[in-house]
Image (cartoon, rainbow, N blue to C red):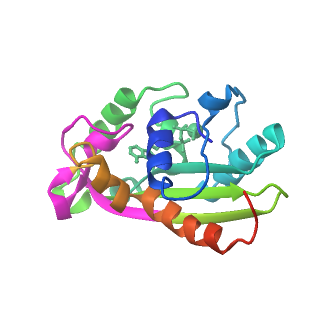
């Protein structure tokens, strides 16, 4: 359950080996805004999943994610989507990040993507998982795959940004993949029909 099509595509792919049908807010034609005022990714993910569960009566899964940059003392964090302002585009957010990082030397560009996944079951109980992916903030945009900050999130192990990586690879190593893989384990243990 997300408004972000980039996320929705990844979530569906990562969950495709599960015996369940994932529908996003566009599929369901739902237009409810959740005010993301939590102090943590977990709080926001839970609020989203719970709000959409209440609205639909369905089990709901939600993602809240963002970037933590060491040089910026953990910013933008939960403000990642609105880093350059409330209705900022990905491009504007990236430009602000590159500007803020202009004077950061190579060894101070470490960052991580964090993803909290909340799953609210039909009966209203919730499960929350978290995934992290370490990397660095690049000096310029590279690649055209993915969404959001992908062109400036550099993964040293592959010498590529998220936007240069094949989606199969990103969906194996990303923060979202890790959080969802953990969630799958919980879902498999659940003795209920979803
Ligand atoms: O894999 C990723 N690759 C690139 N960028 C990413 C990724 N994962 C999160 N991000 C960025 C996008 C957005 O700027 C913020 C998440 O904000 P966040 O509020 O969780 O999502 P959103 O507002 O886009 O959609 P929604 O709240 O409906 O799920 O972090
Ligand atoms: Mg959001």
Is 118 positioned to the left or the right of 90 in the image? Answer: right
Magenta stretch in the rendered image: 131-160
Residue 138 drawn at (x, y percent):
21, 47
Residue 98 drawn at (x, y percent):
27, 39
Q: Nearer the viewer, residue 16 or 180?
A: 16
**Where on the image, by quarter, is ligand 2?**
top right
Give the position of the C terminus as an image quadrant: bottom right
Is 122 positioned to the left or the right of 18 in the image? Answer: right
Question: Looking at the image, can residue 76 be seen?
Answer: no
Is 85 positioned to the left or the right of 33 in the image? Answer: left
Q: Is residue 153 magenta?
A: yes
Q: Is residue 148 magenta?
A: yes
Residue located at (45% from left, 40% from top): 9
In the rendered image, the residue lying farthest to the left is 159
Q: Answer above or below: position of 99 versus 49.
A: above
| Total labels drawn | 0
Give the position of the N terminus as an image quadrant: top right
Q: Answer above or below: position of 121 versus 96.
A: below
Residue 30 drawn at (x, y percent):
70, 28
Is 191 positioned to the left or the right of 173 in the image? Answer: right
Q: Answer above or below: position of 118 versus 8.
A: below
Residue 104 drawn at (x, y percent):
23, 51
Residue located at (57% from left, 49% from top): 64
Q: Quadrant of residue 55?
A: top right
Q: Nearer the viewer, residue 17 or 5?
A: 17
Residue located at (28% from left, 36% from top): 99
Residue located at (39% from left, 33% from top): 93
Q: Quadrant of residue 117?
A: bottom right
Question: Looking at the image, can residue 84 be seen?
Answer: yes
């Amino acid at each position: 359950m997300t408004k972000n099509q980039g996320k929705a595509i990844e979530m569906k792919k990562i969950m495709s080996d599960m015996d369940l049908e994932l529908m996003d807010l566009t599929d369901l034609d739902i237009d409810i805004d959740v005010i993301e005022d939590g102090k943590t990714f977990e709080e926001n993910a839970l609020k989203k999943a719970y709000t959409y569960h209440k609205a639909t009566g369905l089990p709901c899964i939600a993602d809240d994610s963002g970037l933590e940059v060491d040089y910026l003392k953990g910013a933008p964090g939960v403000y990642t989507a609105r880093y350059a302002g409330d209705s900022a585009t990905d491009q504007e957010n990236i430009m602000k990040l590159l500007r803020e990082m202009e004077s950061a030397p190579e060894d101070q560009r470490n960052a991580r993507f964090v993803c909290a996944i909340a799953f609210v079951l039909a009966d209203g109980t919730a499960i929350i998982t978290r995934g992290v992916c370490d990397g660095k903030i690049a000096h310029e945009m590279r690649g055209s795959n993915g969404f959001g900050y992908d062109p400036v999130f550099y993964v040293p192990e592959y010498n590529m940004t998220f936007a240069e990586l094949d989606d199969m690879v990103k969906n194996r190593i990303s923060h979202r993949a890790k959080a969802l893989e953990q969630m799958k384990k919980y879902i498999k243990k659940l003795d209920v029909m979803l």
